[in-house]
Image (cartoon, rainbow, N blue to C red):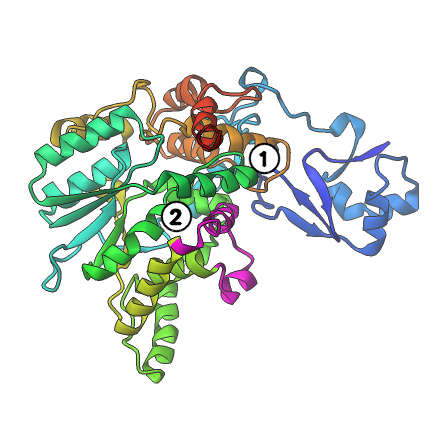
Amino acid sequence: MYYLQTRWRIENQSIYYYGMRKKPYLLKNKMHLSKKELNIVKVLPKELDDKEINQLNRLIKQKLVVLEHEINHIPKNLDDAVFCKTCAANTFIIPGLELDDHGLCPICASKEETKTLKSVLSIKNDPPKSLKSRFDVALFYTGGKDSSYLLYYLSKVKNLKVLALTWEIPYMSQSAKKSIENAKNKLSNVEFVNRKIAETDLLKIYHKLYLLERNTCACPSLAYVLFYPDLVHENIPYFVLGNEPVQMLNLYYNHLAPKYAFNEKNHRTMTLFVNIGRILTLRRPLREGQFESLMTMKQLAYGDSIFKKISGYHSELIDHVTHAIKEVPLMLTPLKKAIRKSNWSGKIPAFIHIDFNEIAGGNYKWDDVKELIEKEVGWVAPNQQIKGLHTSCNIEKCKEYSQFINFYEMRSKMIPFSAIEIALASSRLNITREQAIDEMKSSMGFTLNDVEECSIMKNFLNRSKKTSE
């Protein structure tokens, strides 16, 4: 009796794999089938005759069609999972994770091939001072570990005039709030701007997002909608993203960005072609990072461009957020106005990236960073002090849980972000493998049972019902 291997599913004329394949098939999750192959696969499991076996030869060779004893079984908890030999990746948090003959996960097995992939944005570790704005740089500041480290670097190491923008989400942790207040007292060259979204509007967006995503996480997309007009008004030259390296690499392993997107030469070439068109239409040419900024804002305001659709790379998260924002259409009016204004004037805040590994002396070690920012900017650790991944939100565990369940049950093609990021962090030695596994067990949402933190989100969503009663 032959079966279609676990985690493969028929989708139109193809089969798709909900997992992470080992080399040489890494990221090759979709396989188009011939009509004959499809007709046989549709009726599996079944006994196959010699002719049918011959017709499915390539699927059998790759073990996509297997005998019963070759079927992979997906564990139901961490205790039953098979772990990578060198990092914290395992077959529970990433269902369908394939290990090679040496016991290595695809992340570790491809480590050499991806070591030069640093950012999909231009890396600029030394942003210049501005002569045309009150501020040299701006950033989103959540009070979490990474944004606190970035704030420290820009304000204290580089002595830049910084605009720190905070969207006060309903789920902001007490430790993050304390971190923000402490930073305000310690940093004299930083201007802090806090903003909320009206609860009635936020609830409309969150309800729609919950229907699509099973959670209400809209960071940083809604923050872009809120603050882009301010960035244009203040003529901010650079908007700095300080995502730690594992978050950038997640885009590659989650099939959200191809290798060529990490190449700065490709970015410059793209900007060159765009600038030819801009000059011909009497608009100012763009400088490094401005094209990426403009495209990000246009995607939120108008949806995917034709080029993005053709590329085959898109984010379910961005799709869902853009759909949810349409529940409050007037929220996009200031954003669209700012896009038009900056597009014609050329005064677009350039998106740039700070390479945390490089500025941290070669390796962004979480323990060292925590100790540094506690001292320099008054960062306050969350109650679960072992936690190092995403430290500013009370429902982070709920977000991880919903992403995990959606992928585990094959309703989403997106591998849980935190699953890849914690594996990458241990593989790249930002933390030890033991620390990563401890964090996974104690404070992350990888479970088949409801997590307590989801009640915080549901209680907020239910406020609209209570108000109307």
Side of 280 where 166 appears, left or right:
left
Residue in the foreground of this view, choosing between 154 and 228? 228
Residue 72 drawn at (x, y percent): 69, 28
Residue 52 drawn at (x, y percent): 89, 45
Of the two numbered discs 1 and 2 in the rendering, the one whose residue sits closer to the viewer: 2
Q: Is residue 228 visible?
A: yes
Name the residue located 32 percent from the left edge and 29 percent from the top edge: 391
User: In the figure, residue 60 lies in which quadrant?
Assistant: top right
Find the distance from the CA under tag 1 to the CA under tag 2: 22 Å
Residue count near mark 2 (Cα–Cα under 10 Å), binned few <14, some 14–19, many ≥20: some
Name the residue located 51 percent from the left edge and 24 percent from the top edge: 446
Name the residue located 55 percent from the left edge and 15 percent from the top edge: 79
Magenta: main secondary structure:
helix
Q: Is residue 98 visible?
A: no
The residue at which mark 1 appears reads as 407
Residue 245 drawn at (x, y percent): 34, 42
Residue in the foreground of this view, choosing between 426 and 257? 257
Kind of residue indicated by mark 2: Ser
Start and end of the magenta stretch? 303-330
- Rendered-image quadrant of the N terminus: top right
Q: Earlier in the sequence, mark 1 or mark 2?
A: 2
Callout 1: helix, strand or loop? helix
Q: Residue 86 — which label?
A: none
Magenta stretch holds residue 327: yes
Q: Residue 221 — which label?
A: 2
Give the vertical position of 402 relative to 77 (above or below).
below
Residue in the foreground of this view, choosing between 344 and 49? 344
Residue 254 drawn at (x, y percent): 50, 44
